[in-house]
Image: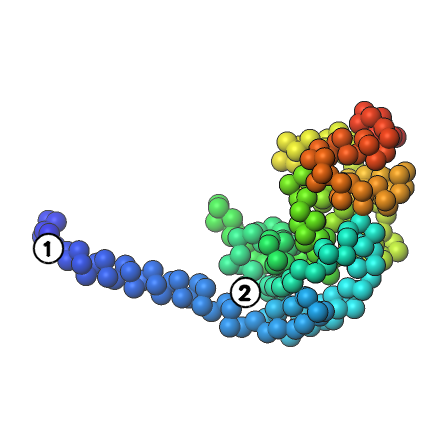
């Protein structure tokens, strides 16, 4: 079938085949070149690390070294069955990270049974044509932050817990795992601000995460570690975070807010 557009005839079949081949080549170049370059390292019975550069080996060794302390720290809040899922960690350098849209301006993320961590500087192309460089300040802490999210997912309560609670707990456990003795809990936002999901689009993640961790620390200092454990393990039955929080603390939510804001 041939059509004549002006003076230049175009073969639609030939054009379609060329487009198909072009798309296939792009698919192979985009996806086919990333997977073969990963090497594997098993850091525990159920955690496998996929890495692409020997410079990442020191991070892998640090992960391996700190996993026992993470389990000791986090087991105050999670049941033993949460640690049974198999997890694959992908350490991404600047060459592989630029293909991962979820790593734009992020240190890492957790999805299903996978944790992805940015380990080197990532050059990010902006919509206006400019570029910025983003570097993960602490890949080791990122792993334990995301591993906490894996435990929350394994508890089957992820959708029942507010974002401030999940992110604050992930920060709190990651800091306590690495045992940074110089770390100080910082707060810049009122408790009512972080408990409103709409405000998470208005403030920087740094402020939101720091303040969320501060209030997790304060909950533990007032009501003990058992309060966090009971919230995680009881919210599924009640299907109501605030009601569980009130029951565990024996306080109305208004009173909880007042105590945390002092």
Residue 160 image offset from top left, x and y in percent: 67, 39
Q: Dividing the image into 4 quarters, which one contains the N terminus?
A: bottom left
Which image quadrant is residue 179 in? bottom right
Q: Which residue is mark 2?
A: 95
Q: Dividing the image into 4 quarters, which one contains the C terminus?
A: top right
Which residue sits at x=65%, y=62%? 87
Front in this rendered view, residue 170 or 150: 150
Which image quadrant is residue 144 in? bottom right
Look at the picture and state if 189 lies above or below 2: above
Would you say residue 77 is visible in this rendering?
yes
Q: Is residue 128 left or right of residue 175?
A: left
Q: Is residue 7 left or right of residue 45?
A: left
Dot 2 falls on a residue whose secondary structure is helix
Look at the picture and state if 91 lies above or below 229: below
Which residue sits at x=61%, y=68%? 50
Residue 4 image offset from top left, x and y in percent: 9, 51
Residue 243 image offset from top left, x and y in percent: 76, 30
Which residue sits at x=71%, y=38%? 237
Q: Which residue is mark 1?
A: 2
The crowding category of the residue bearing disc 1, from other C-alpha atoms within 10 Å (few below 14, some 14 to 19, many at least 20), is few
């Amino acid at each position: 079938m041939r059509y004549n557009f002006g003076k230049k005839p175009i073969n639609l079949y030939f054009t379609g085949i060329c487009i198909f081949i072009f798309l296939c080549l792009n698919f192979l170049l985009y996806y086919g070149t990333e997977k073969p370059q990963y090497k594997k390292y098993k850091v525990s019975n159920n955690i496998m690390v996929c890495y692409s550069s020997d410079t990442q080996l020191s991070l892998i060794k640090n992960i391996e070294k700190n996993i026992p302390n993470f389990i000791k720290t986090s087991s105050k809040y999670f049941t033993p069955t949460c640690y049974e899922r198999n997890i694959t960690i992908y350490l991404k350098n600047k060459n592989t990270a630029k293909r991962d849209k979820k790593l734009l301006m992020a240190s890492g993320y957790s999805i299903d049974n996978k944790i992805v961590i940015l380990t080197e500087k990532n050059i990010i192309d902006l919509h206006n044509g400019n570029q910025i460089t983003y570097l993960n300040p602490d890949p080791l802490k990122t792993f334990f932050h995301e591993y906490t999210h894996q435990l929350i997912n394994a508890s089957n309560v992820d959708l029942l817990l507010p974002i401030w609670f999940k992110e604050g707990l992930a920060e709190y456990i990651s800091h306590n795992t690495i045992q940074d003795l110089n770390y100080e809990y910082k707060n810049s936002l009122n408790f009512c601000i972080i408990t409103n999901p709409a405000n998470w689009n208005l403030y920087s993640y740094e402020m939101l995460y720091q303040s969320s961790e501060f209030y997790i620390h304060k909950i533990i200092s007032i009501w003990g570690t058992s309060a966090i454990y009971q919230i995680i393990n009881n919210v599924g039955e009640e299907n109501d975070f605030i009601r569980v929080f009130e029951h565990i603390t024996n306080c109305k939510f208004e009173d909880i807010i007042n105590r945390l804001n002092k």
